[in-house]
Image: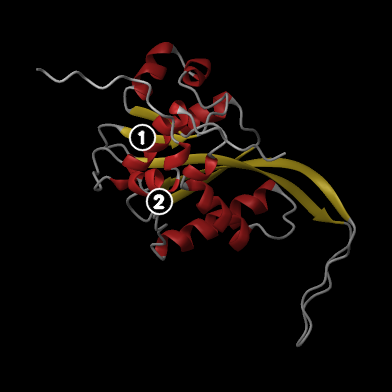
Amino acid sequence: MWCIPKVDAEFVARMEDVLELYAEAPDPRRPVVCFDETPRQLIGGVRVPVPAKPGRPRRFDYEYVRNGTANVFVFIDVHRPWRHAKVTDHRAATDFAECMRELVDSHYPQADRIRVVLDNLSTHKPSALYEAFDPAEARRILRRLEFHYTPKHASWLNMVEIEIGVMVSQCLDRRIATKKILIAEIAAWERARNRDRARIKWMFTVERAREKLGRSYPVSLARPARQAA
């Protein structure tokens, strides 16, 4: 069921926080990275597909077999043409924690602080790193991270949702039977997209939000300051 978000003060505060990050000038020392994940069903065919021929596409039998599921974590840099997708068996708190360690140590080792835009999933919390690592290691990683959460039921504010949609349409819109094939296909897609320097042109700003959603913004109940006589 689609949930219509309530535009209250909490919604506005989180929305404007994220939109301001998107509007910032690029800063290699303080990059902004959007993060999310998508589950994928692994589906194989019961029979070997009929090969394509001139004037006739490859044909698949309607019967299929379920081979379990996999998860794809996706990162995208807001200010430069870079994305990364990682395939895992699960999307548990420990998987999230490992993604954050890789973000710090492998993808942005020179950054002072990485601002991460993400949703409110229960595993997307600083506590996840303490579940996965010893306290010293968890603290080391978290010192380099700064989490910025989208409003509840407003994942459209996370730029990575657009990138996941592109990945699904360009790479995952067919049967993929095994995790090994999924990893290979996504890696090829990622290399091509980074090579082409593909970018997402984000148009929604704080100003546009106030213009479009102004009537839904909470009305301040604070009294105006008294003027001196």
Q: Is residue 197 above or below residue 217?
A: below
State which quadrant residue 4 falls in.
top right
Question: Residue 167, percent across and down?
Answer: 57, 56
- Which residue, given by chain and number where applicable, does mark 1 sit on? 17
Q: Say if residue 105 shows up in the picture.
A: no
Residue under label 2: 204
Q: Residue at x 49, y 27 (%)?
A: 97
Tell me the kind of residue under disc 2. Answer: Phe
Above or below, 112 against 214 in this view is above
Q: Is residue 65 found left or right of 107 in the rendered image?
A: right
Viewer-proximal residue among 157 and 12: 12
Instruction: Tell whether 121 sits left or right of 160.
Output: right
Say if residue 106 shows up in the picture: yes
At label 2, counting other C-alpha atoms closer than 10 Å, the crowd grade (few under 14, some 14-19, many 20 or more) is few
x and y, in percent, of residue 47 in the image: 89, 62
Q: CA distance from mark 2 to mark 1?
A: 13 Å
Number of residue marks: 2
- Outermost residue, top direction? 135
Residue 116: x and y in percent read 40, 35
Identify which residue is drawn at 33% across, 47% down: 207
- The residue nearer to you, when weighing 45 against 221, is 221
Q: Callout 1, which amino acid?
A: Asp
